[in-house]
Amino acid sequence: MSDTNDIHRVWKLMEKIGVCMLASKDGDKIRSRPMGAHPRESENAIYFLTDSRGHKDEEVTQDEHVCLSFAQPSDGKFLTVTGRARVLDDRALIKDLWDASAEAFWNGADDPSVRAIEVTPDDAQFWEGPHGVVATFQMIAAAATAGPPVLGDQRKVDLH
């Protein structure tokens, strides 16, 4: 069982980073694309707006297992989330998720091709640590002392 603080930390990282690579299976290949995430800890779900004419919707329908990769290297923050996805044609949810960035892709929340993907997370793994000059200094110090560098926190978190 995962620590409640770690679970909350995972959700906060998703909110902070915002964009992730959503990887799904296309037969025996794995496809990945950037997506704007709408994490909702209270619902234990991460939502994405998608287009019904896209391949990812078909891929998720064929195999629900997905992986989300969040990264903010400039702040030393990395997170992966594995889970199960499904495509929803829920007009109220789509309107609730609608934001200015969606306007670039569709003619409005009522566009009949807009769908939502809901990901229910199974687990996550995060890495948070120093970056830039601090990380470089720690690597040099570790090499000089023949000890491992201390590069921050990393944990696997059960999100069930």
Image: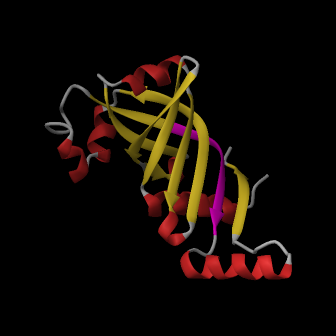
Q: Position of residue 103 (x, y in %)?
A: 18, 45
Q: State the residue lying farthest toward the right.
A: 146
Quadrant containing the C terminus in the rendered view: top right
Q: Position of residue 52 (x, y in %)?
A: 31, 24
Please state the extent of the stretch shown in magenta in the rendering. 119-128
Quadrant of the image occupied by residue 144: bottom right
* Left or right relative to 119: residue 92: left
Picture coordinates of residue 84, whole percent (x, y): 57, 32
- The coloring applied to the image is secondary structure
* Residue plotted at (48% across, 39% down): 22
Q: Is residue 10 left or right of residue 50?
A: right
32 left or right of 49?
right
- Residue 18: give x, y in percent of width and height: 42, 56
Name the foreground residue: 130 vs 113.
130
Magenta stretch: dominant SS?
Answer: strand
Identify the residue at horizontal 39%, vertical 28% (top origin): 88
Above or below, 155 relative to 146: above
| 88 drawn magenta | no
122 part of magenta stretch: yes
Measured along the vertical axis of the image, is residue 62 above or below residue 2? above
Location of residue 149 (image quadrant): bottom right
Picture layout, residue 125 above or below residue 16: above
